[in-house]
Image (tube, helix red, strand yellow):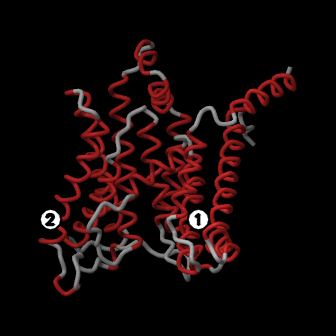
Amino acid sequence: MRKLSFDSKFEIIRFSVAILIALLLSFIIILLVSDTPFLALQKLYLGPIENLRRFGNVIELAITLSFAGLSIAIIFSSNEFNLASEGAFYASGAVAAMFVLSNSLPAIISPFLSILLGGVVGAVIVTIPAVLKKKWGASELVSSLMLNFIVLYFARYFINNVFKDPSAGYNATYLLPETAKLSKIVSGTRIHSGLIILIVTVIACVLFMEKTKWGFELTQVGRNRQFAKYVGINTSAIVIMSQVLGGFIAGVGGAVETLGMYTRFQWQSLPGYGFDGVIVAILAKNKPRYVPIAAFFLAYIRIGADKMATSTDVTSEMIAIIQGIIIMLVAATAFLSNTRQKMLVKEVRNNG
């Protein structure tokens, strides 16, 4: 079994402490604002595991958040703040729906091709801000945010004018063919075969980042681009590669979400998954191996918050407070810095 490095052990401790502090503060706040604080806490912490269906909701949301987190983790590893994964999620879901509605392909082939097409669409969208920055020095943050809305309204035109089902009663496509949908793999839930695709994607990302030359170069570019350039790494190519890969993962995630969870494509606004991916990536420290854990945690507290909001007098906005506290503590480099120093000294003494 691989032994954890000192940094990995410390990050696990720091992340755990951040969660405990956030949950303690949420406990105090709920005590102050709720007439039934212990019921609210029960629904928040235990609501997601009350039955199989609700735990299934956690896994379903975690699948989507994991794709988003992997996408952002790869993109941010190059120290590029490209947020076009949000638009990529939307566009790939829309394109996947339009593709399966335009063809009558057999099962397996239809979802495979539509997910692959969604990945390509996502890669193209996320790469645009990177190219704009390389060619003309445009801020990738600003251009990616603007691009998200261009993608949204462009895709909505086709959804609401070309593929809209007049009998649906609302703006949505025709029913997606059964042969195009991802199969359910756990009875009594909506957990779909996208979970298998996610597992393969996580393993591939971990191997890419930790075992390949390109992953090593990507890490070095993100840490110190000038040094990477000095030692002969083609930094521009590595940055573009990271955006293409991150965009492809976001595109796969959007297509998987559409074909796994919906009977029609009906998003009329950006879904927010790309921005959720930022939270997941921050919690996972941009490390693909920790993304599913961070995604599961975020999905768990969100489903718990929904259950708390429907069963007690505490609103689901409480979860935003918990998220904010955790992100601030995890992202703050000075948090537990003294503890890290003491642990490092102890480690050196024990090994010396």
Crowding at label 1, few (<14), some or many (≥20) Cα neighbours within 10 Å?
many
Q: Type of residue at label 2?
A: Tyr
Q: Residue at x 21, y 71 (%)?
A: 103
| Of 50 and 206, the residue lying toward us | 50
As drawn, 232 above or below 19: above
Residue with the mark numbered 2: 157
| Of 114 and 172, the residue lying toward us | 172
The disc, 2 or 1, on the residue closer to the chain's N-terminal end is 2
Q: Which mark is residue 199?
A: none
Quadrant containing the N terminus is top right
**Res 78 → quadrant:** top left
Q: Is residue 197 left or right of residue 155?
A: right
Q: Is residue 222 left or right of residue 347?
A: left
Q: Which mark is residue 300?
A: 1
**Residue 255 in the image: x percent, y percent?**
35, 62
**Residue 121 in the image: x percent, y percent?**
27, 52
